[in-house]
Amino acid sequence: MQKTSIGKYVTILLMFVFTVTTTIAQKFSPSSYIAEHKDLAQQLMNETGVPASVILAVAFHESAYGNSRVAKHLNNHFGIKGKNNSKAIRSAYKGYGSAEESYRDFVGLMQRRKANRVLFDKYDSDDYEGWVKGIFRAGYTSLSSWTPKVLATIRRYNLDKYDQKEQQPVAKGMLAKSGAAKIQQDILLSSMEANDTSAGFTSGESHVVTKGDTLTELATRYNTSVEALKRRNNLQSSNLSIGQRLLL
């Protein structure tokens, strides 16, 4: 009986260590990934007409919201195949110098391939469902589960909010409106965090980065050190992103 109890204890301990290690290794939570890349997705939508929600959702799905090995080592967020010069992993997927290059190549693929070009004439930038189904029919993937999963991502995180055309820059004297926009953004991030059930964090053990946060200030606030925060969150630099969740 004693050996059985010890065995159960060891198993539970190993599971705990694995969970903590996996959580720390993740660079992004779902909401922080969206917060990090939404502006780029909106910019590409305004440039090309591909809905920002579709760009974000496809990247989210294909890259495990930025945590896949291909995303980490090749900056490939869309599962596009091609050449790479990586010495870290062996992969048939295309390598990019940055995540932005990957995003731009995806919308470029939509424009280059004849099967995809018809989508620009057929669907508006606010018809995310039509776009997702059209991309699947055009041969982006053969997995039947791809379409429902991408659509579910858009709906779960309300990504269609980003399909609204950007407003004109705020003029002087309009700070109240600017403040209201920030409040709406904070509410949206809070809403996404509430839906973020797969990040592996529990209340009181983490901090969601907001505007103005620095590692030095957070280390002081939570009675820890900058190096400890970097180590716990697998950070290579002191740069933080709004919406990023840090393990304390």
Image: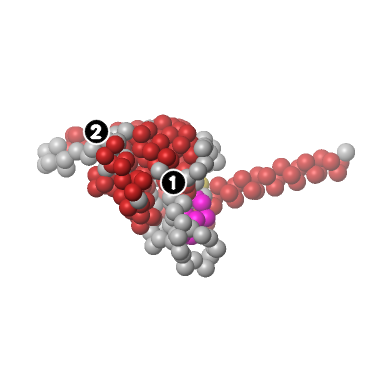
Q: Amino acid at mark 1?
A: Tyr
Residue 241 position in % (x across, y down): 38, 49
Q: How does the figure colour the protein chain or chains?
A: secondary structure
The quadrant of the rendering that contains the N terminus is: top right
* Residue sitting nearer the eye, 72 or 189: 72
Residue at 42% x, 40% y is: 137
Residue 24: which numbered mark, if any?
A: none
Q: Name the side, left or right, on which 128 lies relative to 153.
A: left
Q: Which residues are magenta?
A: 66-74
Packing grade of label 1 (10 A; few <14, some 14-19, many >=20) is some
Q: Residue at x 41, y 57 (%)?
A: 238
Q: Nearer the viewer, residue 102 or 198?
A: 102
State the image quarter where residue 181 is shown. Answer: top left
| Residue furthest out toward the left | 172
Residue tagged 2:
180
Question: Mark 1 highlights which residue?
Answer: 140
Q: Who comes first in sequence, dot 2 or dot 1?
A: 1
- Image spot of residue 239 (x, y percent): 38, 56
